[in-house]
Amino acid sequence: MVVYSFYIFDRHTECVYVKSWMAAEGPGAAPVLSASSDDAKLVFGTVFSLRNMVRKLGGDDDAFISYRTGQYKLHFYETPANLRFVMLTDTGSASMRNVLHQIYINLWVEYVVKNPLAPVEHKGGAGVNNELFELGLDQFIRGMM
Amino acid sequence: MTVFSLIIINKAGGLIYNKTFHDGGLNKISTNDYLVLAGTFHGVHAITARLNPVKPVAQPPAPGTNDPPGRPEPSSGLEVLETENFRMQCFNTLTGTKFLLFTETTQTNVDVTIKKIYDLYADYVMKNPFYSLEMPVRCDIFDRKLLSYIREINNR
């Protein structure tokens, strides 16, 4: 399994955290980040539109889980407070919803929410990119790959 | 095994066909909402193709020839969407027409079903001399064949 990148968006639709593992790829194709911060905006626009589309068709309790293209798979998890976790992996990987949930409860809540120095709103990613969160996330993802 | 509905979107993002096969699978939404949904999906599909994190690799030349490497395979857009209540498969034809099939989450062999629907579309819509391209599909025989094919799947 290959994880390409990971994004967190807050309830103000701002991207508060991005991480990319593009260097760790399999043989053959050599993935690179196609664009810089514009990618985060495109990712948000996509998940936002798809989530609204899914809610319209499947009812308000329905939740968008993932989509797959010929090249990659995008996984989505939204907390009740509208915090959105997005992960891009290769097409073969199974549902990562529980993984995103684990990241939320074991890393986000532990190291960002419970950090007394972190602000309530993470404007520009303030308070999210602390050492413990960064390290924990990297270890967790590399453990899966 | 239930197929909920089928939507066909033309290459410009306009809704040209929309049929519900099973009541209660998806919420009922107005025709206007379906048009909005088709347009939105068309845009999202284009974005999902651009988001591709895997760098396209050039096709190796055919062995034994001196041809330069071929152009890389263009990245495909969204193919399968999964949610808690349904699953949507998208088939994008070479000319850009999109077939969206909404099914149960556990549905299997959807790509076979969708290819068969494309066959029916080619046979009874494209070969209909009174059908004008990119316009809404109003072909009785296509409706009939499609309904009987889907009924067969839903009753399996």
Image (spheres, coloured by chain):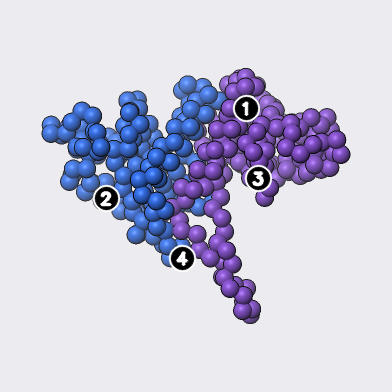
Chain colours: A blue, B purple
The structure residue drawn at horizontal position 64% and vertical position 38%, both measured from the top left corner, is B12
Residue A47 in the image: x percent, y percent?
45, 36
Of all chains, the one bearing label 3 is B
Residues indicated by labels 1 and 4 sit on the same polypeptide chain: no
Of all chains, the one bearing label 2 is A
Marks 2/4 in contact by CB < 8 Å: the verdict is no
Which comes sooner in the sequence, label 2 or label 4?
A: 4
| Residue B55 visible | yes
Viewer-proximal residue among A6 and B22? A6
Q: Secondary structure at mark 4?
A: loop
Q: Amino acid at mark 2?
A: Asp
Q: Which mark is residue A138?
A: 2
Of all chains, the one bearing label 1 is B
Query: Mark 1 and mark 4: span between their CA atoms?
Result: 41 Å
Q: Which mark is residue A28?
A: 4
The structure residue drawn at horizontal position 13% and vertical position 31%, both measured from the top left corner, is A116
On the rendered image, what quadrant is the N terminus of chain A found in? bottom left
Residue under circle 1? B35
- Closest to the camera, between mark 3 and mark 4, is 3
